[in-house]
Amino acid sequence: MIRSSGDDFKFAVIGDLHTHWDEIDLAQFSRADYDLLYFTGDLGGGTPDSTLRIARGMAGLRQPTLVMPGNNDTGDIHQLAAELAHQNGLNQLMSISRDTEQPVNPIVLCGYSRHLIKAGQLEVALLAGRPHSMGGPDLSFPDYMSETYGITSLEDSGRRLMALIDETDTEHLIFLAHNGPWGLGEEAHAIWGCDFKEGGGDWGDPDLTAAIDHARASGKQVMAVIAGHMHIRTKQGVERPWKLEIDNTLYINAARVPRIFSNGDDVYRHHVTVTISEEGAHANEVLLPQYG
């Protein structure tokens, strides 16, 4: 269990990197006071070499760190895990497709896994959903998902997540994912709407929605659902909302791409701060200046 340094638990959500990570990011996050870092995935530029290069650049982080593999991160998953946690060697990494409660020291891949945190006296389970999601109504990379995670369909994935919920004793949950849930809008500019097909459409993950519904039906309180994947600026040039609050659940899409950008006289680096307390979950966007 990861405990907060104060009454509140504060962690950073770093959206889809797409190669936008360097030694300045490493220095900024390493000296920050976050209790946890969460990366929503898509580390590289779509090739295994670029993904591994970014993983090597992240490996010096000091805080407990969770990394959700994105749809661009379907290279050798064990090699990626080894790069991220090479400080600890390979012993904790080779069974990632079967673990349900993985260690968080210092950097591990997550997916179909549970990670416990404590904010003051409040215990919260972080439940990591399906890795490598491309969104939509079909299972992404079915052969790869079957071989790596034993998942053969979206229904199979939903059952896996529901079983994880049933095995979780804590009342308060936060879902972590690469892509967000189905059911939050069909417009192209909806928080996880489809902006690359005429007419838009809901591009969320149905298995994640089934898991959220199951958690609520089981009496759990879903504090937040945190993901990325669908870029905040759509292909039509419209910005989709990066957060919503519905039925006391905070939904966050942290995929502001590119996350490093020039604006005026400085270069800014984007992430989202999430604060967990007994009052609930709260989130704010952060733009760190490179030179200011």
Image (cartoon, rainbow, N blue to C red):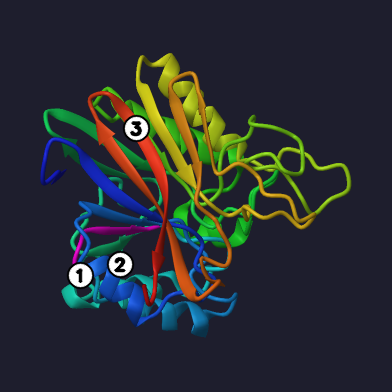
On whether residue 64 falls in the magenta region, the answer is: yes
Q: Which amino acid, mark 1?
A: Asn
Q: Quadrant of residue 126?
A: top left
| Lower position in the chain sequence, tag 3 or tag 1 | 1
Q: Which amino acid, mark 3?
A: Ala
- Segment colored magenta: 62-67
**Which residue is the site of mark 1?**
91
Q: Can residue 211 be seen in this snapshot? A: yes
Secondary element at tag 3:
strand
Q: Nearer the viewer, mark 3 or mark 2?
A: 3
Q: Nearer the viewer, mark 3 or mark 1?
A: 3
**Which residue is the site of mark 2?**
94
**Which residue is the site of mark 3?**
281
Q: Which amino acid, mark 2?
A: Met
Label 1: few (<14), some (14–19) or many (≥20) C-alpha neighbours in 10 Å: few
| Lower position in the chain sequence, tag 3 or tag 2 | 2
Residue 287: percent from left, percent from top: 43, 60
Disc 3 and disc 1: Cα gap in Å? 34 Å
Disc 3 and disc 2: Cα gap in Å? 33 Å
- Looking at the image, which is closer to me, 90 or 202? 202
Q: Which residue occupies 76% across, 50% down?
A: 195
Callouts 2 and 1 close, C-beta under 8 Å: yes
Q: Which residue occupies 56% across, 42% down?
A: 180
